[in-house]
Amino acid sequence: MNASSPSPAQNQASTTSLYGGVVNRRVTVRDLASAKQRGEKWAMLTAYDALTAGVFDEAGIPVLLVGDSAGNCHLGYETTVPVTMDQMVMLSAAVVRGTKRSLIVADLPFGSYQESPAQALHNAARLMKEAGVGAVKLEGGERSARSIELLVDAGVPVMAHIGLTPQSVHAFGGYPVQGRGDEAAHRMLRDAKAVQEAGAFAVVLEAVPAELAAQVTAQLAIPTVGIGGGADTDAQVLVWTDMAGMTAGRVPKFVKQYANLRSVLGDAAKEFAEEVRSGAFPAEQHTFH
Ligand code: KIV
């Protein structure tokens, strides 16, 4: 079997639904391109470890993002800025090991690609070779186009990320909505077209007015993945700890919490501690003789 004679499974890519259809192999960027053509919306979640990623894989989430949001959602930093390549490789390898079907996309962290396209390729190759991910994500529109081009030429599928790019938190002075006003909206459209032109297979639109995200989605051939971009993007991504109610304190307006894991886990820990204190645990059925 070579590149000119795809396997039957690869041939199914253009017609099979992302939900339940792609079962014996990983989801690919071709499946996502076909989903856009069919108008099929899809979900992406972040994941930072094998156990949680396995749950999402079994639940049928077609794309998992090892986001550098690991910085603030998993590793205890305040922002994504301190996250290193070594950390991303370790977390991504765990997510790959814990999954069978999801396409795994890993973030290139701050400082790992901005120096030059060559630096971007060096670090993208680490994520593919050492962790086994199927694609990488990097932030920036026109400013990252040359790097995207080199990665794509080298065979690395690239997801771009425009709008609110969290690695620029210090330049933005926080996490403000992007693309408001005519000039900013035009810049966003230019950025979106630049990453598509450079060969990105999808683009994340973060914290963008819904009307602008809809316009970008209509004008692009590649899928848009919204987070705080309204209902009209081709896909939606949430940080898993926000989605499942693990995050402490307030979550952004665009988050819907589908569970309250923080209180479930906290209650379980309190009950365990109470049963240890009272002597109720361990009981006879937990005891060897
Ligand atoms: O790092 C991350 O989790 C992300 C998502 C917010 C898209 O980039």
Image (spheres, rainbow, N blue to C red):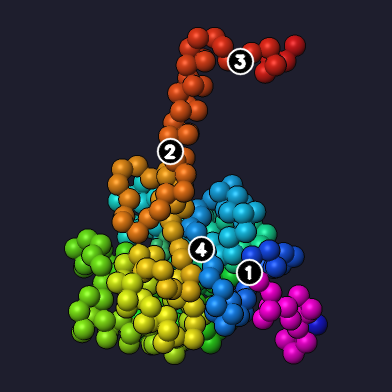
Residue placed under numbered mark 3 in the picture: 282
Q: Nearer the viewer, mark 3 or mark 1?
A: 1
Ligand 1 is within 8 Å of the C-beta of the residue at disc 1: no
Please tell me which of labels 3 and 1 falls first in the chain. 1
Q: Which mark is residue 245?
A: none
**Residues at marks 2 and 3 touching, judged by CB atoms closer than 8 Å:** no
Is the residue under label 4 in contact with that under label 3 (CB below 8 Å)?
A: no
Task: From the top left corner, tell me how far across and down residue 137 is, in percent.
Answer: 46, 71
Marks 1, 2: nearer the viewer: 1
Given this view, does label 2 or label 3 mark the residue nearer the observer?
Answer: 2
Instruction: Quote the CA–CA distance across marks 3 and 4.
Output: 40 Å
Q: Mark 1 points at which residue?
A: 18
View extreme (top): residue: 279
Q: Name the residue under label 2.
A: 262
Tags 1 and 2 touching, CB below 8 Å: no
Residue closer to the observer: 15 or 125: 15
Q: Can residue 147 be seen in this view?
A: no
The quadrant the C terminus occupies is top right
Identify the residue at image location x=49%, y=78%: 223
State the separation of the CA atoms marked 2 and 4. 21 Å
The residue at label 4 has a CB less than 8 Å from ligand 1: yes
Q: Is mark 3 within 8 Å of ligand 1?
A: no
Q: Quadrant of residue 210?
A: bottom left
The answer to which of marks 1 and 2 sits earlier in the sequence is 1
Q: Which numbered disc, 4 or 1, marks the residue closer to the eye?
A: 1
Give the mark count. 4
